[in-house]
Amino acid sequence: MILDSKGEFSDAQDLTNVATSATVNSTNVVDLGSATPGDIAHGEPVYLVITVPVAFTSAGAPTIQFALVSDSTADLATSPTTHFLSPAFLKADLAAGTILVYQLPQEPPAYERYLGVQITHAVAALTAGTINAFITKDPVRWTAHPDAI
């Protein structure tokens, strides 16, 4: 599989400079090109993949949760529509090398123009941890490779 950079939300996004109990947007937000883009998968299953290149650490016991959202504004702050919400993970659940794959609902709420991932962590500040996040139609054959291959 070749990863389309337009479907990439986060590339080694560092989550350590975030206030405790905060929600942050993925580094990249995808512009779907219209106010009502319709079916982004064109009738095929689509998957959200989140990988953890650097494990999450903290002096406390934070929880980390991921949401795929769309909104009418690029900052995902107007009135985001949630298309997928992960369970809240403990830091021990997100060791380096963790790969999370979620099939998005076939009949999701209507997508708005801008699509991104929101990461919420609560309870304690993170002292280390990064994620990659992207959408793909083929998670089965997906393999991580170094950049520029």
Image: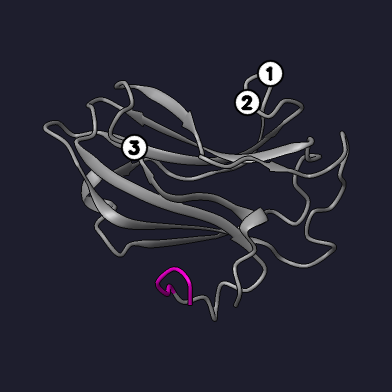
Near-viewer residue (130 or 50): 130
Q: Quadrant of the N terminus?
A: bottom right
The main secondary structure of the magenta stretch is loop
SS category of the residue bearing label 3: loop
Pointer 3 residue: 15
Marks 1/2 in contact by CB < 8 Å: the verdict is: yes
Near-viewer residue (122 or 87): 122
Residue 135: image quadrant is bottom right
For image coordinates 72% across by 25% down, the residue present is: 73
Q: Mark 3 and mark 1: span between their CA atoms?
A: 23 Å
77 lies above or below 36: above
Marks 3/1 in contact by CB < 8 Å: the verdict is: no
Amino acid type of the residue tagged 1 in the rendering: Thr
Q: Earlier in the sequence, mark 3 or mark 2?
A: 3
For image coordinates 84% across by 42% down, the residue present is: 33
Pointer 1 residue: 78
Amino acid type of the residue tagged 2 in the rendering: Asp
Query: What is the span of residues highlighted in magenta in the rendered image?
Result: 144-149
Near-viewer residue (143 or 41): 143
Q: Is 36 covered by the magenta stretch?
A: no
Q: Position of residue 102 (x, y in %)?
A: 54, 59
